[in-house]
Amino acid sequence: MGKTVRESALDVLLKIEKNQAYSHLLLNDTRKKAGLDRRDSALLTEIVYGTIQRKLTLDYYLKPLIKKDLAKLDTWVLVLLRLSIYQMVYLDRVPERAVVHEAVTIAKSLGHKGISGMVNGVLRSFQRTERPSFDAIKDPVERLSIQTSHPSWLLERWIKQYGLEETEAMCMENLTPAPVSMRVNVVKTSREALLEKLVEEGIEAKPAELTEDGIIIEKGAVFETSAYLSGLMTAQDESSMLVARALAPEKGMSVLDTCAAPGGKTTHLAERMNNQGRVLALDLHPQKVKLIKQQASRLELSIIEAQALDARKLVDHTERYDRVLVDAPCTGFGVLKRKPDIKWAKSEKDVDQIATIQKDILQAASTCVSVGGLLVYSTCTVDKDENEGTVQAFLKENPEFSLDASLKDRLPKALDSERFTDGMVTVLPQDHHSDGFFITALKRNA
Ligand SMILES: C[S@@+](CC[C@H](N)C(=O)[O-])C[C@H]1O[C@@H](n2cnc3c(N)ncnc32)[C@H](O)[C@@H]1O
């Protein structure tokens, strides 16, 4: 017999806890192996992501119920307790009795009798007793950290960079579900025609507010529709959709996308060029280059050529391009809503390391920009060292580039003017419920 949803959730969470493996890859693998149907797959995803997302809050609830230090518990016992409490607090549709029963059954099959008794006792006490209040935590950073489950070091960085109010709003927003947004393939259809087709296929969808090519899916299995399978759309967050507009590629231009996999922005660029011109898409990892090719083929975008290359080697590349995009590898602190494991996997050291790589990629990519051409640097992080810091360091070394203040005219009016500084813009997750994102446009003048 295959594993139950909760057994599978425990397996995935333990692997993430021990190996810092990526949750979405593990989840895909587990879903397939356990043969879960759509409903159970959704429950598995919810339990896994929810337990990761709320880790510090769950531990705060557990602490008064456990005699020893939480860190001294066997990891599997702690994770089993966390995922059970997560369901009891946040999932209305699962009866608490069933949660306790299943946790005890799992504990029996994995441990000795004493442990299943302890799990039973802790969960039953949790049902009976009032949850501890966050007001009892005096230190405001610690309170925000536990209430919204973000590591304190990250909050301290954000508070320094954005102030307490924005940080609180960002943390609260990170706990809300991420919208399912799709980008219309304008080479093949229009937003209106696609919306009509989706209604015919039983999908509830509406136009996105921020981006003109965007659609928000409200209900339905959109990836199984013939509209999706025939290449009329691509899954993409609305903030990501702003990047192609910032780069403003035109029909017939030559475009270089230096960090391109899985091809979300590459394909958007080709769509905006009406599939006329040339887009060279690079990525460090050959296995990821395949994903770019698959997307280009599904969307029938023939102008995309994909290759594996370390963008830092572009200094040796002789060709020049009208438009160059560096959608850089980053910590991903803007997408915690979708990938909560990032909060626990990354450290301050990672910010410094990744900022060095970003600077090197940006420097090498800049050598490929034609005079008069545009270079866009974007990330899905909100950390100012990776964003403004990287761009300012680049500008200091490269006086032939300047910030392109007309970036603002190319982006939707709905973006708050306060989020712009010259040719740079930051979208925070709380602004439009889309990913936290940073975009800069740089012009090569000589
Ligand atoms: C933010 S993701 C790109 C997302 C992509 N632009 C999209 O919209 O689908 C960053 C990518 O950079 C790639 N990467 C990391 N280091 C690189 C390097 N030195 N040269 C080229 N690509 C690199 C990673 O493999 C990853 O696919």
Image: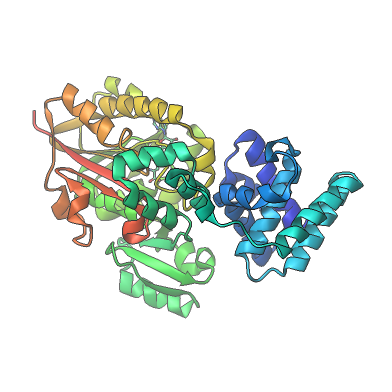
**Residue 340 visible in the picture:** yes
Q: Residue 421 at what x, y percent from top left?
A: 17, 44
> In the drawing, does residue 284 fall left or right of residue 57?
left
Q: Quadrant of residue 159?
A: top left
Residue situated furthest top in the rendering: 316
Front residue of 151 and 409: 151
Front residue of 205 and 12: 12
Q: Quadrant of residue 94?
A: bottom right
Query: Residue visible at 62% across and 65% down?
Result: 91
Front residue of 260 and 38: 38
Q: Residue 232 at what x, y percent from top left?
A: 40, 63
Quadrant the N terminus occupies? bottom right
**Residue 367 visible in the picture:** no
Query: Residue visible at 54% across and 39% down?
Result: 344
Q: Quadrant of ligand 1?
A: top left
Residue 300 versus residue 217 in the image, above or below: above
**Total marks placed:** 0
> In the drawing, does residue 37 fall left or right of residue 150?
right
Quadrant the C terminus occupies? top left
Q: Residue 184 at what x, y percent from top left?
A: 35, 63
Query: Residue visible at 48% across and 44% down?
Result: 142
Query: Residue visible at 23% across and 47% down?
Result: 425
Residue 339 versus residue 321 in the image, above or below: below
Residue situated furthest right in the rendering: 113
Q: Quadrant of residue 441?
A: top left
> In the drawing, does residue 372 fall left or right of residue 348?
left
